[in-house]
Amino acid sequence: MRQREIEAVLQEYSTPAYVFDLDALQQRVGRISACLKRENIDLCYAMKANPFLIGAMEPLVERFEVCSPGEFRICERNSLPMERLVISGVSKEQKDILRMIETYQGKGIFTIESEQQKELLAECARRTGLQVKALVRITSGNQFGVDRELVKSMFAEQQKDKELSLIGIQYYSGTQKKKLSVIEKELQELDVLCREIKTELKTELSELEYGPGFFTPYFQSEPEEHLEEMLEEFLGFIRNMEFSGKITLEMGRFLTADCGTFLTSIVDRKENSGQIYGILDGGIHHLNYFGQTMAMKLPYVQHISLEEREERTEEKWNLCGSLCTAADVIVKQFPLNGAQIGDVLAFERVGAYSVTEGINLFLSRDLPAVLFYSKESGVHLVRAGQATDTINSGQIK
């Protein structure tokens, strides 16, 4: 967001607050989608990155990845069609799966992460008399998904559970991959697996859902991305694949990080042992930059002074939050020019994860407000600041 837009927000709302720029979101997802459509590739939004944005994402992507019953209820409240949802997650419960299948008549896609999950889905489908579509998730060497040999076994035995329609495979190995060569190798291996299933089992997969984990630059020391150039190189990998079915890319951070700004005020300044410490009304329970190391990397921050100052001297500040823990250091030695108590710092590129990933209940501090911004509609309050002390206590009788 530009400074004048931030200043307009601050005229109506106090800090701390998240602001999500819907214009920036639409522009970025539009650029990504335009590139991918050249190879007929769809987008699946991993809503865990930022569930507040699913309404804005609805016209921009084809699918939504849902990883918990709570995320599913958010989709229901936003009237997202079941046929656009991929119900994922390493843990699934029978009562939730049954309700989804019964209520929405078998629509949507479910992932299979284990033999037990396969049996669970088949049993729920039998009880409802409906057929369920599923993607088998392949492990990348952790607790998620199943080994490649078990994937083959599931496709070889799929006739035993006619209630399940195994339409393809899903694969995600991690985020923030700086080298496209890693992604190229993964696609080559997936292509080999699809070919083996086709030749050995006489089964042609119709879908491949892949999470590439594209890199998002968070820090000033990292090179800025060249979006279209990078995606064109990626599309070259796709063109080299034998797989001819539908490809969907599952992404969260890469789509949303740029649209978010966190506004926090300097509430105190002190010097201890020659070091300047700025205390903010936000903290590590609100901000999380993936890849930050001991608060040494400098994120992108706008310094907003709400009054004119003639003399400005650059100083290095250690920016700390309001939690009672020495770990609440957002960034060390950050250069600020003439900063004073009452100034606002706008931390950029926080559109993914920060709004939900922090230790928000620690110290029972209030949750920040969540705001949307667009040029057409201006600033819109999505969630007011909320107290957490009621969550962290019960009644004593």
Image (tube, rainbow, N blue to C red):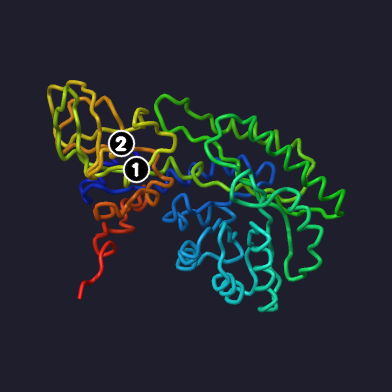
Q: Give the answer, above or below, for where 274 lies relative to 73.
A: above
Residue 384 visible in the displayed image: yes
Q: Regarding mark 1 in the picture, which secondary structure is present there?
A: loop
On the image, numbered disc 2 is attached to which residue? 330
Of the numbered discs 1 and 2, the one sitting upstream in the chain is: 1
User: What SS does tag 2 mark?
Assistant: strand
Between 43 and 28, the one lying in front of the other is 43
> In the image, is 335 to the left or to the right of 311?
right
Labelled pair 1, 2 in contact (Cβ < 8 Å): yes
Residue at image position (84%, 50%) is 198
**Residue at 53%, 52% in the rendered image:** 46
Q: Is residue 7 visible?
A: no
| x and y percentages locating residue 281 in the rendered image | 22, 44
In percent of the image, x 69 and y 48: which residue is there?
Answer: 247
Seen from the viewer's position, the closer of residues 245 and 144 is 144
Relative side of 390 to 192, left or right? left
Q: Position of residue 259 (x, y in %)?
A: 41, 43
Using the numbered discs, state the Cα–Cα distance from disc 1 to disc 2 in whole angstroms. Answer: 8 Å
Locate the C terminus by quadrant.
bottom left
Where residue 169 appears, as percent x and y from the top left, is 70, 52
* Disc 1 crowd, CA 10 A, few/some/many (<14, 14-19, 20+): many
Residue 271 shown left or right of residue 214 in the figure: left
Locate residue 211: give its quadrant: top right
Task: Give how far across and how far down residue 291 sits, in percent.
Answer: 44, 34
Q: Amino acid at mark 1?
A: Leu
Name which residue lies at 81% across and 66% down: 159
Tell me the tag on residue 287. 1
217 relative to 47, above or below: above
Q: What's under tag 2, amino acid-wise? A: Ile
